[in-house]
Amino acid sequence: MDEALRVLLVDDEESYLETAAKIFRRKGIDVELCSIGKDVVAVLKEKKCQVVVLDLKMPGMTGQEVLREIKGSLPAVQVIILTGHATSDDAAVCLTSGAFDFLIKPVEMSHLMDRVRTAYEMWKLSPDN
Amino acid sequence: MRQHTRQTIKRNFFAALMLAPFIPVVMALGTGGYLFWNHAQQGVLDRLTLLSTHYAFQLDRYMDDCLGDMALVGAGLSLDSRSPDLREILERLTDKRKEVVDVALVDSSGAVHAYAGPSVYKGTHVEPGRWLGEALERGSSISGVVSGQMGLPHFVMARRFSHSDETFVLRMSLDPEAFTRMLTGVREDGVDVFLINRKGEVIAGSDGQILTRERELIDPVFLSRIGTAFWDSISNAAYSSRVMRNAGWILAARKHSPTLFRATDSAFLFLGLSVLGGGIIVFLSSLYLTGFVEKMLQQRDDEREKLREQLYRAGRLAELGEMAAGFAHEINNPLQIMKSDQAYIEMLLQDFKERAGEDGEFLGDVNEMGASINQIKVQIDRCARITHSILSFGRAGNAEAQNIDLAKFVPEVLTMVQKKIQLSNISLRVTFPSARLIVHVDSARLQQVLLNLLNNAIYAIGEVAGTRTGEIELFCTAEGEDKVRISIRDNGIGIAEDQHHLIFTPFYTTKPAGSGTGLGLSVCHGIVDSMKGVLDFTSVKGQGSTFFLILPRVSSSVI
């Protein structure tokens, strides 16, 4: 069963979230927004997003903790890490924790959308969805 | 401060080096000198004892001889006439001894029976003297020296003999000149020999003295030590004396200290010269050793200073790297916002373009805005490049380390800059040793470092293009047993000495604004550091630079 692509953008920078949402929507991608780490799983369950674009450094719960929580309860959901705090150690940890990709800010929005679409394809192939 | 400390160390070291050999030398010389002096003194005393014993023996024998002769003469006298003629006897005696002055025959009462001598003896009795009683009692007597009736100094020898139950005494006067003759034979350097009586009066001396007084010989110091050998520090002389068997006279020998010193002078001169020579050698060797130690201290200080400088630089670089990484992280977030807004504006502009339709003026404005937005995009990308460079600068670890054979790897890297080198008209020389050089590092990072260094070399040569032919030399060599050195030498513009300490500092660049981030070398430094290697350089302004990295070598037998 093919669900329409719906992306959850998670970042504590709300101005980025708003602009990014506008761009995604203009490209016909449904977007949900969340700026608090611990709400992510609840939003995912409610809005049924297939792909999450997740920042690492956020107040409260960190991106890595959110990633582990998502992969624990919703393993099919594809997580793309988008962070300014990029170290090779972070990348290694996130990728081994099940992240689909690890992108370093600033990233071209067109490139981000390409990765989101690819992640969506991966979600489709996932046996858990 | 350090200079001051070094001076103090130098001074103390020099003093210690000079003093250390001198203390035992002075002690040895002191002890040796004391022993030598004692020995020399003892030698003099022994010699004096020998002399006094010898002369005492000679004089005793002389007197024994005289008394013996008198006994013979007395026994052979014919006393029938009771007053024999003694002239013949005197002649016989003076034949043998010229010092015999006169002879007299006396009976036990002192009456003169016969006399022979230079004067005519008129009396019937001799002057009462101790010699008569002594001769009668002991058999013989020798008197002290007196001036006598004739006013000439003489001494008397008397010998008792018996004839027909009657006792006679043969009396003989002698000139003490005999003793003087015997003593003047002393040839010993600085030694005086005296024949003295119990009062210390000189009967005869080796300098020809007769009946004189030597101040020192009548001194209680001497008189109380008769029969011994001793050194008197007051008169500064050595003495030895022997009591003679005959007459109780004393044979004394004396040697004054200047003559005593003469024997030791040459020894002390030799010792002094030895000490002086040794001192000069010690001084020169101390000077040399002190200089050597000072040089070593200087070298150690320089090394310590260099190490401190390196540590400071490394610490500062690490601090800067950490700070820059944090800074880059913080910049990336707003960059992402700008980037997304720029993308959104581009989308809107696309809409505007469509809506402008035939309105040329509006379309022109939109296009201008598009160009402006594009410039913003370019600048955001530029910022992104900087922050990404910083992040790789701050990155640690050797994620994908593998064994790399430099002989294969380096030429691959060179092909990437081959074209640029050719276009810049630079001659490139590459040297490898025959032995395999293997390193265990992340190849992408090593490539990044080498490309960075090669690009810098090309840039440095570009700065002096037209003045000389550019040359780049890359050589890989083994550094000791377990390290590898990769050097890249160029003959470009070089680095001024006052800039050397800034070279690895982040954001420091000599390139014009926009051409370089100033991060290349600091990133390389961080990378080589993470490979447990060293990146450093030597450079002379106007002549060129050599950048070299030293990496741990993997033994080729391990592969």
Image: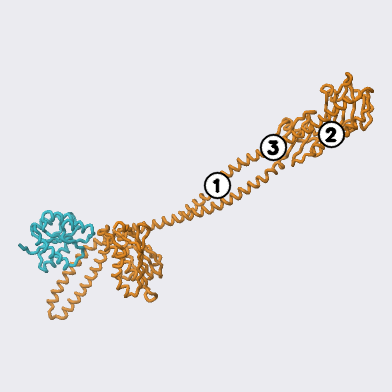
Chain colours: A cyan, B orange
Name the disc covering residue B19, or none. 1
Q: Is residue B230 visible?
A: yes
Q: Which of the 4 image quarters holds residue A97?
A: bottom left
Local secondary structure at mark 1: helix
Labels in figure, total: 3
Q: Is residue B156 left or right of residue B340?
A: right
Q: Where is residue B436 in the image (x, y as percent from the top left)?
A: 33, 62
Which residue lies at the image location 51% right of the left edge and 52% below the top edge? B289
Disc 1, disc 3: CB below 8 Å? Answer: no
Query: Are the residues tagged 3 and 2 within 8 Å (C-beta)?
Result: no
Looking at this view, name the residue that lies furthest to the left: A1
Q: Residue at 32%, 68% (x, y): give it.
A: B454
Q: Is residue B56 above or below residue A80?
A: above
Residue annotated with mark 2: B176
Secondary structure of residue under mark 2: loop
Q: Say what secondary structure mark 3 lies in.
A: loop
Name which of mark 1 and mark 3 comes first in the sequence.
Answer: 1
Q: Which amino acid does label 2 sit on?
A: Pro
Q: Is residue A59 left or right of residue B459?
A: left
Q: How crowded is mark 3: few (under 14 residues within 10 Å), some or many (20 or more)?
A: few
The Cα–Cα distance between marks 3 and 2, rounded to whole angstroms, is 32 Å
Image spot of residue A23 (x, y percent): 14, 67
Q: Find out whether the residues at labels 1 and 2 contact each other: C-beta distance under 8 Å.
A: no
> Which residue ends up furthest to the top in the rendered image?
B165
Of pointers 3 and 2, the one earlier in the residue sequence? 2
Subunit of mark 3? B
Which of labels 3 and 2 is toward the front? Answer: 2
Give the residue number, with chain letter if any, for mark 3: B233
Q: Label 1 to label 3, Cα distance in Å?
A: 34 Å
* Three-letter code for the amino acid on which mark 1 is drawn: Leu
